[in-house]
Image: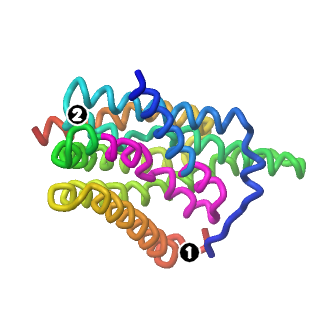
Amino acid sequence: MISLHLASIGQTKAHQYVVRFLVGGLCTVVAGVIGKHWGPLVGGLFLAFPAIFPAGASLIESHEKENKKKIGQDGRTRGRLAASIDSAGAALGSIALIVFAITSWLLLSIRSAASAILIATLAWVVTAVLLWQLRRHRIFRGI
Amino acid sequence: MGEVIFRFLIGGTVVSVFAVLGDVLRPKSFAGLFGAAPSIALATLGLMVYQHGNQYAALESRSMVLGACAFLIYVSTTSYSLRRFSAPTLVTTLALLPIWFAVVVGLYKLST
């Protein structure tokens, strides 16, 4: 069952939010600079750069370690496993990212930019959720 | 300079929003989907359309398909490595980042 775990917001330290904001902003600027210098074909590659992924996965590991520490256990293995599960989710998300890119590529030529980007975003959401449901029910039931 | 600052703020905000979504959603495998959200693309494509038009943004999206394929290989390798080896997550994710670059360069060479 999908749920919101709002307590996680409090677990994330202020500097971790700042780091993600800075990395996200920096990667967007770099993607733009690369596009300007080498053109859209090279610049476009960086629209799918795993900018925030290392920081996000590392954060999940540290949250898991902290939770285990509270009950006096060593959470290193558990932390890595949680990050691994998060990465497996990101693998499904990246298939949806391919769908996003194909959709926006095809629609930007024939529709308004706003509708093309909106439809591509919806395609990402639908594909990601469908793939997650498929994996949950057929392959990794119980995770 | 103004454009760079604007791009930075938009990028930081969009990436942060998706990151927070990934933080608060459960189970973890579902939250993981947001690790591959089109955050940089959403922050960039609108600006590209505004500055260069739809065709330019469409070309960027076409190349993004290759970047996303490289992303898939990178995160799949990361997931396997985190299960298989004992290095900390940050070390693993950063050490494997060259895989993204290698795959993206290879796919780009094949496609041009």
Q: Residue at x 72, y 51 (%)?
A: A9
Q: Residue at x 33, y 37 (%)?
A: A46
In this rendering, position of residue B1 left or right of residue B107: right
The residue lying furthest to the bottom in this view is: A137
Residue placed most toward the observer, A108 or A136: A108
In the picture, which quadrant includes the N terminus of chain A? bottom right
Q: Residue at x 54, y 46 (%)?
A: B84
Q: Is residue A130 magenta?
A: no
Q: Which residues are magenta?
A: B18-47
The residue lying furthest to the top in this view is: B1
Protein chain holding label 1:
A
Amino acid type indicated by mark 2 = Val
Amino acid type indicated by mark 1 = Arg
In the picture, which quadrant includes the C terminus of chain A? bottom right
Give the label on residue A42, or none. Answer: 2
| Residue under disc 1 on the same chain as residue under disc 2 | yes
CB-based contact (under 8 Å), mark 1 and mark 2: no
Is residue A39 positioned above or below A116 on the image?
A: above
In this rendering, position of residue B31 left or right of residue A7: left
Q: Nearer the viewer, mark 1 or mark 2?
A: 2
Q: Quadrant of residue A32?
A: top left
Dot 1 or dot 2, earlier in sequence: 2
Q: Is residue B34 magenta?
A: yes
